[in-house]
Amino acid sequence: GVRRVLFRSGTIVNQASGRQQISFYQSYMVDNFGNQSSNSTGSGVMIGTSERRATLEPDIPMKFQVSEKGPSDRATTVSIILNYDVPGIGRGTLTLRNIPIQASR
């Protein structure tokens, strides 16, 4: 079986001098057994109240959360890989490592 993993303690900050958009276009998880979840379109990423994308004001922290289907019932931790795009700057990858999975479903 699979479990949904929710990571909700992240904050993202725009350190540029003006507004900046960010979009997450793909994400997946890898559990502590090496199993990879199927790729998603980033739809499990919420920035503030928006799904997958947001406009960030300078120097104002905004919370984000990630919700994905975990690859295994036996897993105790996962790493989440998020691919993002910032117009005018380019694409990058954010990796959140060794996130504990809670026992409840």
Image: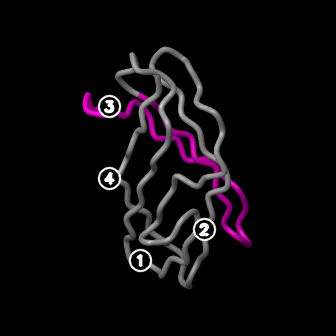
Q: Nearer the viewer, residue 3 or 20?
A: 3
Helix, strand or loop status at disc 4: strand
The reply to whether the magenta stretch includes residue 94 is yes
Q: Return the disc, 1 or 2, that comes first in the chain's sequence.
A: 2
Specify start and end residues of the magenta stretch as a single range.
78-105
Task: Judge depth for marks 4 and 1 and give the one in front.
Answer: 4
Determine whether label 2 and label 4 are within 8 Å by CB: no
Along the line of sight, which residue is nearer the eye, 28 or 1? 1
On the image, the x and y values in percent for residue 40 come to 64, 45
- In space, the residues marked 4 and 1 are separated at their CA atoms by 18 Å
Label located before the other in sequence (4 or 1): 4
Identify the mark at residue 59; answer none if there is no mark.
Answer: 1
Dot 1 crowding, Cα within 10 Å, few <14, some 14–19, many 20+? some
Question: SS at mark 1?
Answer: loop
Q: CA distance from mark 1 to mark 3?
A: 29 Å
SS state under label 2: strand
At horizontal 59% and vertical 77% (from top left) the residue drawn is: 20
Three-letter code for the amino acid on which mark 4 is drawn: Ser
Tag 4 and tag 1, C-beta contact below 8 Å: no
Q: List the residue tagged with mark 2.
A: 22
Chief SS of the magenta region: strand
Name the amino acid type tagged 1. Answer: Asp
